[in-house]
Image (cartoon, helix red, strand yellow):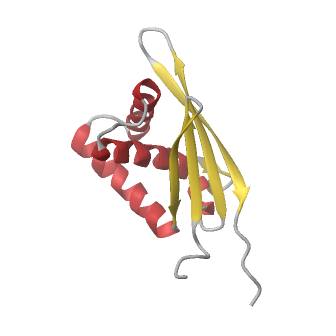
Amino acid sequence: MAGAINTGNVTATVDNKLVLSWHGTPTQRDDALRMFPVIRDKTMPDVELGSFADATIASIHDNGMSADNHMSNIQSIAMLWRIFTAPLGNGTYGDVIAHANLHATFELHEQINDEFKITWNISVMSGRTTPAA
């Protein structure tokens, strides 16, 4: 039962396909947030975190989730980073993971000169109910 009360679910779609189904605690959220800059530093150190996340998410739109387990983990962490760091009121969507479920819809928008923009819409679903003691 440990952690049963403070866990949340995060799902995400890219190009209307479900590509992420994550279940975790605030501690696991923090781990993902800490890992993402480390991953960026090892792969594209001169790229801003948001741009790295967007490029990684765009790769999902272009080719789907990677068949390579390591790369698909990076894709998942990029989506989680975008979701957890998105502003919500005076905090972020990541702040509500202990008591709510989240769903993000990511969309790729082609721009001129082979550029792109990633946008996302995040929905918050009410969390679980705790059984009466």
Q: Write the residue at 34% across / 55% down.
A: 35
**133 horizontally vs 58: left or right:** right
The residue shown at (43%, 46%) is 76
**Depth check, front residue: 22 or 97:** 22
Q: Position of residue 83 (x, y in %)?
A: 54, 47
Residue found farthest to the left? 42
The N terminus - image quarter: bottom right
At a point 41% along the width and 12% down the height, the residue shown is 114
Relative side of 127 to 86, left or right: right
Residue 48 at x, y = what percent?
A: 37, 37
Q: Residue furthest bottom?
A: 133
The residue at 55%/28% (across/down) is 15
> Would you identify the image quadrant in which residue 53 lies?
top left
Counting the numbered discs, the total is: 0
The answer to whether residue 43 is seen in the rendering is yes
Image quadrant where one finds the C terminus = bottom right
